[in-house]
Amino acid sequence: MKKRIISGIMVTMFLVTMVTVAFPVQVSASTGDPIVIGLIGPMGWIQWDGIKEGAIMARDIINNAPANDKGMWDGSEYHLIQFVEIDEHGVPVPDPTAGVTELLTALDTHPDMQFLMGGFQEGCVLPIREAAMDYAALHKRPIWDICGTSVDQFIDDGPAKDNPYDDVRENYERYKYMFRSDPMNATWLGKQLFAMAGMLQIPKLKAVYGIPQDGLLPTYIIAEDLIWVEAILSGPGGLLASADLLGLDIVGVGRPSSIETDFGPFLDAIEASGAKLIIHTFSAVAGATFIKQWGERKVPAVPVGINVESQMLEFYASVGGKCEYETIMSALGTRTNINPNAKPLSTVEFWDAYSAKFGHAPIYTAWGSYLYPLLLNKSCAQWYGKQGDEIIPIIEATYEPDTYLGVFRYTTYHDLYCDEYSLAPIWPPASGSSIGTIRAHLPQWQAGRLEIVWPRGYNLVLMDPTPLPWARKWKIPPWVYSLGETDFAGGPSIPIPPPKIAADAGLPTGLFGTFTSADGTVGPADMTPATSYWQQTCPWTLLEADMDGNQFIDIDDVARVALDWGKTA
């Protein structure tokens, strides 16, 4: 990953040079003063590349619009977007004091900088946030939209939590200038991850290993030693507190450094513990090292979790394909056409245009930094010329029904909104839209591509059995279970989500469907789902029967089952 970081620095230096070049002069005579937006992040890390490059994508679309419509329209004239780059000083050693100084200098130097985007390294973001809020109390700016860190208390840690730091919910007057569009907070990320794993990977692995569905699956947690992980791991409703509800037996917990380079001792511990599932949680460079060493060693335990580095399309090649079968939570996008009708770019169009422009795929920070200028552009006529106190209600009311990742809105307390069905295997349309609200997905590396394996379907009550057009079967590594491709019969009816988790989240309980899972043999019970949907699209609850991932049951799928049936007969 050193090459990637160095490469990121070189790209950043190149882009800094490019940004200083004057904008094209072929603009309307009615062009007014520029809209100045600050970009803040850990220069030298890929999270900064995402923040900056996503913002550049949006800027160029707005500034380079056809005809004379170049820039944001305030109702009477256009305004070009300009960026001010601010290093939060998160690498190589976090120095929040330097980050505070740099932000305050930028604010003083650019009195027209009303908006700020970014923020990743949690040890830097907290003190910078406090300095920014002190400044905003006097100057009514900046309005800061986080697209990077998921730490709860930076925006909203919920009604039940008590920590030393206030947030929008607890002190609205001070923190009303803070928003988050990317990603959802760590607690909600954890809930989504646990709910999705509890519906798919956990019951299937129990069946593989002959563990009763009401039994416990041996699980090892490996999570980088950073603050944001605490809400997922140890907070109320976190993994340790909810393990028994999810059917997990936590047999070990490893907390490596976020820059760890030798995971041998941790992999030794995983194998010695007898774990069958690994829940891994990484936002920094150690995640790449971990999964590469896991794949090289072919550890007989399946990794499911969060690995920010693994979201990049070029990640597969960078680790020599050793991430194959890794399942990660994608807080936002992959190259999956979630909304082909989104404007100005669909999900795939954004991914491809970004990759062509910058030579690598976007990570999650890019999705948020691209979206936010587009949202500001849409409401420019409402907020232009106003001060922070007048602008904030306009930002709070943002509702965009057709983004490239789903319906966008903020919560009452300025966090990214997800509806309750972000914990379900379905993605029902939101009110006024043909697509659902932005939610996390579980993609898996399959043959060098990130394929989304959860959610799977559209409808809550199975009235529409058609899978989402981009849903794929979840695959078990062959060194974990050699019959994982074809042994998918005998699946239990699973209460989704588990009743206690549902109650805590205010969700309905009940059955969302029957999901096929392994029973230890390949035979007639496995053949039945395939032959029952011969030459048809299989329902989303039976995607396991689609071996080649084309959402259509054909001779290839049936033959694979028959071949393994013959081998095990």
Image: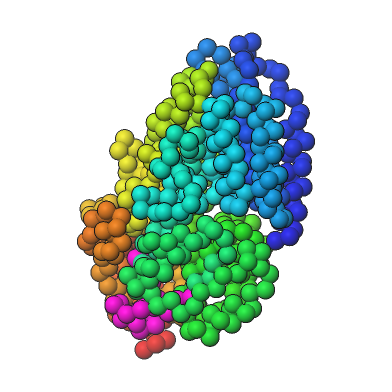
As rendered, which of 108 and 479 lies closer to the eye? 108
Quadrant of res 242: bottom left
How far across and down, in percent of the image, does residue 63 sit? 62, 25
- Reply above or below: 292 against 160: below
Q: Left or right? Give the position of 45 relative to 457.
A: right
Task: Residue at 60%, 64% (x, y): give it.
Answer: 287
Q: Quadrant of the C terminus?
A: bottom left
Task: Residue at 43%, 46% (x, y): give it.
Answer: 156
Count of marks, rendered view: 0
> Residues in magenta?
199-220
Do we see residue 16 in this rendering?
A: yes
Do we see residue 350 in this rendering?
A: no
How far across and down, in percent of the image, does residue 339 sit? 44, 43
Quadrant of res 341: top left
How far across and down, in percent of the image, does residue 99 sit? 67, 43
Was residue 208 drawn as part of the magenta stretch in this picture? yes
Q: Left or right? Give the position of 553 relative to 464.
A: right
Q: Quadrant of the N terminus?
A: bottom right
Tell which residue pokes out farthest to the front in this image. 164
The structure's colour scheme is rainbow
As rendered, which of 235 and 85 lies closer to the eye? 235
Was residue 412 drawn as part of the magenta stretch in this picture? no
How far across and down, in percent of the image, does residue 9 sit? 74, 48
Tell which residue pokes out farthest to the bottom in this image. 569
Task: Residue at 46%, 20% (x, y): give it.
Answer: 382
Task: Residue at 60%, 20% (x, y): give it.
Answer: 79
